[in-house]
Amino acid sequence: MHCHGLRVRACRVATWLRFASQHRVRKLDIEVPSQTRFLFVGPRAGATELEEELELPVWDEVARIRFTLEQRWRLRLRSAGVFVALTDLHISLATMEASELGTLVSSQCPRLTNLYLLVTLSAASNVCIRSDLLRSLQIRVENVHRLQVIAPNLEVLAMSDATEAHVSAPKLNEVTWDGGIAYDPRRHCFADAGRHIRLLDLGSKCVAASLLQRFDKADVLKLNLNLCDRTRTVGYTRFVNETTKLPKCETLRLRVSLGNYYHNLAPSMLHLLRSCNSTRKVSVKVDSGLPMPRVAMLMTLLLTPLKRPKSLSLEAPMKKCSSWSSLPDAMHQA
């Protein structure tokens, strides 16, 4: 159910939830448009927005719940009852209590395998998530002191803006780390994860040596690099220091933000490619104010002299934010 009106109240959504529970709905999707998207419906001067509460009922048959709500809404959960069939849970833009969030995932959803959380805690607290069957977790919880995840079957983890996190997941195989807080081994820990994973994907503010060196090998390494540095030195120096040692990877995928400042492109690419002796495929996507043919020409001039395996494939977009296509043949003649 997708609501496209300018104002939807929590009490209205509550009636839909009661209807769904009474009729034993198996898949429930509710998307409420955020009022912040509509500039002309903001609160009047001196007015205050009242927090609204929305209670989630429990029923046995539901297998998938996907909510996109209002951040000012407080999602409440009944302490009694178990979602015996629920395998997929998606909660976006809601406020919750830490104890209720922990209970929901750890006790009330015994069959949960996929979890997406983008929520704010009503008060700064610790959160603990325990799940034996959870395989995929995408999480960003604001106002949390320490996040603890204990999931013996977790394979895919996407984490954003985690102030402090301890993850126990021996089967962890894909890690995405994004947001404004980089991995710090003093505050973040993958307790018993292996040293070889399928995917390591780092956001532009999260390319940190401590996380790159946590794993010896990643089949696919994805790095988002922001080279829009007008000083031409500070950002580049930090980038080199953080990427001195990369995990071995079969495929290296780069998304490079240049803006109108392409001066750091050549030394940055040379630094990365010289650190990837075992890499067989490199993909590059460039976001730049420069014309894409000019960027492609720069990449060609830069990479042609490099010695690399014949199986290496180099790609780049030929226009801004487009799909990738092959660079000129000259790039493959090294």
Image (cartoon, grey):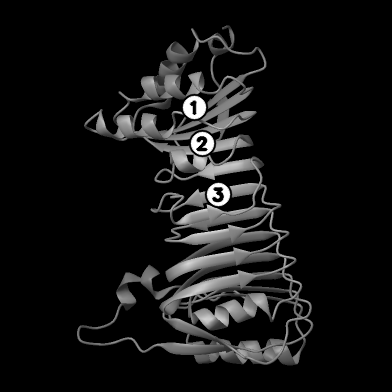
Residue drawn 43% across the image and 41% down it: 208
Q: Residues within 10 Å of mark 2 (few under 14, many from 20)?
A: few
Circle 2: element type:
loop
Place of residue 24 in the rendered image (x, y in percent of width and height, measured from the top left): 77, 86
| Residue 191 as seen in the image, left or right of residue 292 | right
Q: Which mark is residue 294?
A: none
Residue flagged by tag 2: what amino acid is it? Ser
Q: According to the image, label 1 marks what residue?
A: 318
* Camera-nearest label, 1 or 3: 3
Place of residue 98 in the rendered image (x, y in percent of width and height, measured from the top left): 50, 79
Residue flagged by tag 1: what amino acid is it? Met
Q: Between marks 2 and 3, how big is the CA–CA gap?
A: 23 Å
Residue drawn 43% across the image and 14% down it: 302
Q: According to the image, label 3 marks what residue?
A: 176
Q: Earlier in the sequence, mark 2 or mark 3?
A: 3
* Count of all numbered marks drawn on residues in the image: 3
Q: Earlier in the sequence, mark 1 or mark 3?
A: 3
Q: Are marks 1 and 2 in contact (CB under 8 Å)?
A: yes
